[in-house]
Amino acid sequence: MSDRVSSHDSVDDLLDQENKRLAENLATKVSRLKSLAYDIDREADDQNEYLDGMDSNFLSATGLLSGSVKRFSTMVRSGRDNRRILCYVSVGLVLVFFLLYYMVSRIQS
């Protein structure tokens, strides 16, 4: 009977060691998951701050553009001299664009 008790104790010891090993393995995995969840939370907070900053930048750009459009439409509706100046500025901007395009294409080739 002592052999049965001894073999039963050794099986219990083996099962206990296996349970401890599995519990440690599980604790390690839980720790990694907790760290990963914390990193995801921190990254989400950083991205939300970035998006909030972009939102305020877009709002300021929208305000700037709407003010420019108002000034432009006021200038177009005003006298003939302003229209002539507007045409000269437009032609000048187109020429500058093509000049820059030409220079960039020469540099790249």
Image (cartoon, grey):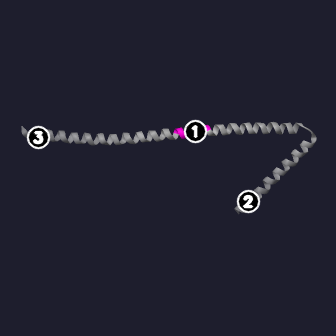
Residue 5, position as x, y percentages in the image: 10, 38
Residue appearing at x 25%, y 39% in the figure: 19
Provide the residue designation for mark 3. 6
Disc 3 on helix, strand or loop? helix
Query: In the image, is 109 to the left or to the right of 30?
Result: right
Q: Main secondary structure of the magenta part?
A: helix
Q: Quadrant of residue 72?
A: top right
Residue appearing at x 63%, y 40% in the figure: 54
Quadrant holding the C terminus: bottom right
- Region of the chain picked out in magenta, as a range: 44-52
User: Looking at the rendered structure, which numbered label has been put on residue 105?
Assistant: 2
Badge 3 density bin: few <14, some 14–19, many ≥20, Cα 10 Å: few
Callout in the foreground (3, 1): 1
Outermost residue, left direction? 1
Residue appearing at x 70%, y 38% in the figure: 60
Task: State which tag comes first along the sequence, 2 or 3.
Answer: 3
Query: In the image, is 94 to the left or to the right of 30?
Result: right
Provide the residue designation for mark 1. 49
Disc 1 on helix, strand or loop? helix
Q: Amino acid at mark 2?
A: Ser
Task: State which tag comes first along the sequence, 2 or 1.
Answer: 1
Q: Amino acid at mark 3?
A: Ser
Disc 2 on helix, strand or loop? helix
Query: In the image, is 6 to the left or to the right of 95?
Result: left
Badge 1 density bin: few <14, some 14–19, many ≥20, Cα 10 Å: few
Placement of 90 over or under 4, stated as above or below: below
Q: Could you tell me how far apart the alpha carbons at marks 2 and 1 are, in whole angstroms?
A: 39 Å
Q: Could you tell me how far apart the alpha carbons at marks 3 and 1 are, in whole angstroms?
A: 64 Å
Q: Amino acid at mark 1?
A: Glu
